């Protein structure tokens, strides 16, 4: 795989929470990363923070996002901006997928 093209068949599926959450790092460069995250109903993305700015786009399903103590519902077609350093988490209400964009890239995701 070269640094400009990221074919699906060459991308590993990382298990984050067995049977509940998996992800694929779809593409990454020096300044940006895109990650597809797959959630089963009831799965929880634990509350956390990181210095990276994050944009999340809901590809399908239903989610509640928790950002700095506020709950925001997300459905297919909705997007959300999570500023760097903000505490956030997510609960999947109906099986779905999120497309997350990080800037700068999450080096911890690449080292898995």
Image (tube, helix red, strand yellow):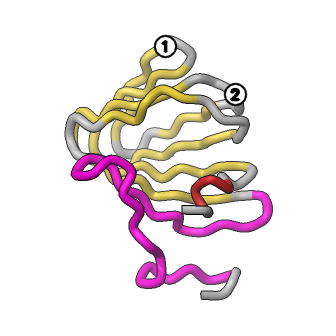
Q: Quadrant of the N terminus?
A: bottom right
Q: Residue 102 lies in magenta, yes or no?
A: no
Residue appearing at x 33%, y 31% in the figure: 91
- Whether residue 111 sits left or right of residue 12 in the image: it is right
Q: Secondary structure at mark 2?
A: loop
Q: Which residues are magenta?
A: 4-31
With 28 as the anchor, is 66 left or right in this view?
Answer: left
* Image location (x, y in percent) of residue 105: 69, 55
Query: Residue 100 location, x and y as percent?
Result: 53, 50
Tell me if residue 11 is in the magenta stretch: yes
Which residue lies at the image location 43% right of the left edge and 27% below the top edge? 65
Q: Which residue is painted at 43% across and 17% down in the image? A: 71
At label 1, counting other C-alpha atoms closer than 10 Å, the crowd grade (few under 14, some 14-19, many 20 or more) is few
Above or below, comparing residue 31 to residue 90 in the picture: below
Identify the mark nearer the N-term, 1 or 2: 1
Residue 72 vertical position relative to residue 23 in the rendered view, above or below: above
What is the number of the mark on residue 85? 2
Quarter residue 23 falls in: bottom left
Outermost residue to the bottom: 1
Task: Name, please, the residue furthest toward the front.
Answer: 112
Side of 37 where 107 appears, left or right: right
Q: Is residue 60 visible?
A: no
In the image shown, does 49 or 41 lie closer to the viewer? 49
Q: Is residue 102 left or right of residue 36?
A: right
* Residue of label 1: 70
Which of the pair 80/19 is nearer the observer?
19
Numbered circles on residues, count? 2
Q: Nearer the viewer, mark 1 or mark 2?
A: 2
In which quadrant of the rendered image does the C terminus lie? bottom right
């Amino acid at each position: 795989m070269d640094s400009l093209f990221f074919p699906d068949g060459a991308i590993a599926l990382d298990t984050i929470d067995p049977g509940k959450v998996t992800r694929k790092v779809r593409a990454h460069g020096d300044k940006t990363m895109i990650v597809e995250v797959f959630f089963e109903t009831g799965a929880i993305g634990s509350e956390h923070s990181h210095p990276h700015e994050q944009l999340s786009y809901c590809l399908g399903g239903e989610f509640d996002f928790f950002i700095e103590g506020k709950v925001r519902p997300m459905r297919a077609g909705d997007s959300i901006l999570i500023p760097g350093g903000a505490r956030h988490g997510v609960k999947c209400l109906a099986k779905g997928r999120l497309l997350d964009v990080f800037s700068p890239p999450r080096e911890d995701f690449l080292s898995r």
